[in-house]
Image (spheres, rainbow, N blue to C red):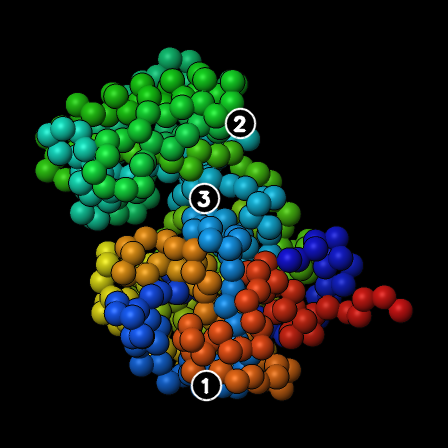
């Protein structure tokens, strides 16, 4: 784990350039016992070469057996202990769309979902409705008024929106209303601390007011809300790591978590891996560190579409020479967590990880980039929070510790 006090003392502003390429939900499972995972099934000649030339391992985002959310999993990749620095999806989504979040605001991440005639959830993502329809339905939700607070509702992307409550004595310690499985109705919001009782009641009032406003919709006929949070005022990259850091991401949530740690979010024209890599190329001389986020690996895993996830990974590999042409001193390729198509959800399985640093990284026994080969790697089974110190060390950005 990155000990911030120690790293602050050792980090220096001079050194090599670092690229952290995160394929969201990268880890997977075989569809049949003994078969390949999505990553192992994909044709990835470039990543396989990098795995042979670099060092590999399997990273653990939170702890053994724990399936992480995307927020804490990314904080771990950035070196922040997710059990110490806890943050909900609401703040990440709000910051990701550029919402002017105030210190006392509480923000929740909303999903449009589909319920049947009995009020039971049959699709947690409302068929992944387009963002244009999400924006239209948000306009309906903006008509809701709650006593004693200001209410802000903003569209995010696809089926996601943000709900922000602004007022006195609001608490983010409110339970989620998404049961996270099909076949159950949305849960009531409950206070997780006495001071959150009023906030939970306001959330329930909002949800009940939304029900009739969405009743005519074939798919997005109900909502769930989770990830209530406030801005946690995290330590910043420039202070801890002495890095001028940039983020290249398409989805707002990942822009939000990047802003929380002090990265500059760069605009991307397009949504393909090549489009994102082009953005890195356009700003290469301006920054020391680039976080590049690829979302569809996770989405296709959640859809249960093994072959589509394979194709996303292959698309990244095809575009990867664009990054290599920039000659980064350190390139890390990993995921924030596993999302096996077999399970259709985030899972606890360790994540394949490779670190490539020409002339500075020892090679290991791995002959390809995949779960089985990474289990033979020199990094072993390690906490994801170790990645940033490893990146800084291989970039020659840490001075010696002690005499």
- Does the rendering let one see residue 162? no
Residue 367 image label: 1
Q: Do the residues labelled 1 and 2 touch (CB within 8 Å)?
A: no
Image point (26%, 69%), residue name: 32
Residue neighbourhood size for the residue with mark 2, other residues' Cα within 10 Å, grouped as few (<14), some (14–19), many (≥20): some
Report which residue position mark 2 lands on.
Answer: 104
Residue shown at the point (61%, 62%) measured from the top left:
386
The kind of secondary structure element at disc 1 is: loop
What crowding class fits label 1: few (fewer than 14 Cα within 10 Å), some (14-19), or many (20 or more)? Answer: some
Q: Which of marks 1 and 2 is nearer the N terminus?
A: 2
Quarter holding the C terminus is bottom right
Residue for point 45% across, 44% down: 92
What whole-number distance in Å separates the C-alpha atoms at marks 1 and 3? 37 Å
Number of numbered labels in the structure image: 3
Whole-percent x, y for residue 134 in the image: 23, 41
Sequence-earlier tag: 1 or 3? 3
Residue depth check, mark 1 versus mark 3: number of the one nearer the observer:
1
Say whether disc 3 or disc 2 marks the residue closer to the N-terminus.
Answer: 3
Circle number at residue 88: none
Say if residue 363 shows up in the picture.
yes
Identify which residue, 127 or 142, lies in the foreground. Answer: 127
Q: Where is residue 69 in the image (x, y as percent from the top left)?
A: 43, 48
Q: Mark 3 points at which residue?
A: 92
Mark 2 lies on a secondary structure that is loop
The reply, left or right, for residue 199 in relation to residue 206 is: right
**Mark 1 or 2, closer to the camera:** 1
Asked whether, in this view, residue 399 is left or right of residue 92, the answer is right
127 up-or-down from 269: above or below: above
Question: Residue placed farthest to the top in the image?
Answer: 147
Q: Say which quadrant the N terminus sits in.
A: bottom right
């Amino acid at each position: 784990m990155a000990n911030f006090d120690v790293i602050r003392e050792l980090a220096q502003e001079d050194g090599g350039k670092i690229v952290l390429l995160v394929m969201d939900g990268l880890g997977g499972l075989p569809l049949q016992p003994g078969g390949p995972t999505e990553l192992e099934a994909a044709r990835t000649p470039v990543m396989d070469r990098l795995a042979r030339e670099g060092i590999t391992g399997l990273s653990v985002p939170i702890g053994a057996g724990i399936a992480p959310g995307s927020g804490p999993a990314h904080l771990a990749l950035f070196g922040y202990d997710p059990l110490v620095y806890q943050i909900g999806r609401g703040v990440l989504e709000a910051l990701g769309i550029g919402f002017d979040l105030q210190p006392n605001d509480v923000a929740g991440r909303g999903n449009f979902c589909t319920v049947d005639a009995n009020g039971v959830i049959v699709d947690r993502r409302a068929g992944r409705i387009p963002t244009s329809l999400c924006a239209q339905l948000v306009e309906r939700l903006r008509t809701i008024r709650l006593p004693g607070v200001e209410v802000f509702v903003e569209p995010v992307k696809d089926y996601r929106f943000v709900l922000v409550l602004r007022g006195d004595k609001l608490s983010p310690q409110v339970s989620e209303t998404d049961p996270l499985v099909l076949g159950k109705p949305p849960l009531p919001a409950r206070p997780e601390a006495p001071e959150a009782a009023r906030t939970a009641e306001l959330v329930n009032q909002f949800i009940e007011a939304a029900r009739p406003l969405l009743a005519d919709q074939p798919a997005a006929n109900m909502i769930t809300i989770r990830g209530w949070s406030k801005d946690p005022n995290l330590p910043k990259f420039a202070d801890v790591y002495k890095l001028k850091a940039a983020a290249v991401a398409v989805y707002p949530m990942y822009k939000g978590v990047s802003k929380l740690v002090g990265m500059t979010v760069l605009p991307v024209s397009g949504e393909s891996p090549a489009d994102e890599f082009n953005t890195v190329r356009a700003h290469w001389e301006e920054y020391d560190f680039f976080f590049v986020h690829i979302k569809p690996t996770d989405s296709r895993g959640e859809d249960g579409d093994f072959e589509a996830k394979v194709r996303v990974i292959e698309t990244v590999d095809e575009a990867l020479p664009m990054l290599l042409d920039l000659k980064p001193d350190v390139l890390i390729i990993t995921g924030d967590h596993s999302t096996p198509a077999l399970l259709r959800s985030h899972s606890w399985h360790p994540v394949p990880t490779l670190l490539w640093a020409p002339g500075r990284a020892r090679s290991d026994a791995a002959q390809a980039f995949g779960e089985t080969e990474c289990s033979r790697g020199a990094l072993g089974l390690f906490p994801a929070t170790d990645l940033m110190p490893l990146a800084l060390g291989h970039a020659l950005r840490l001075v010696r510790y002690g005499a």
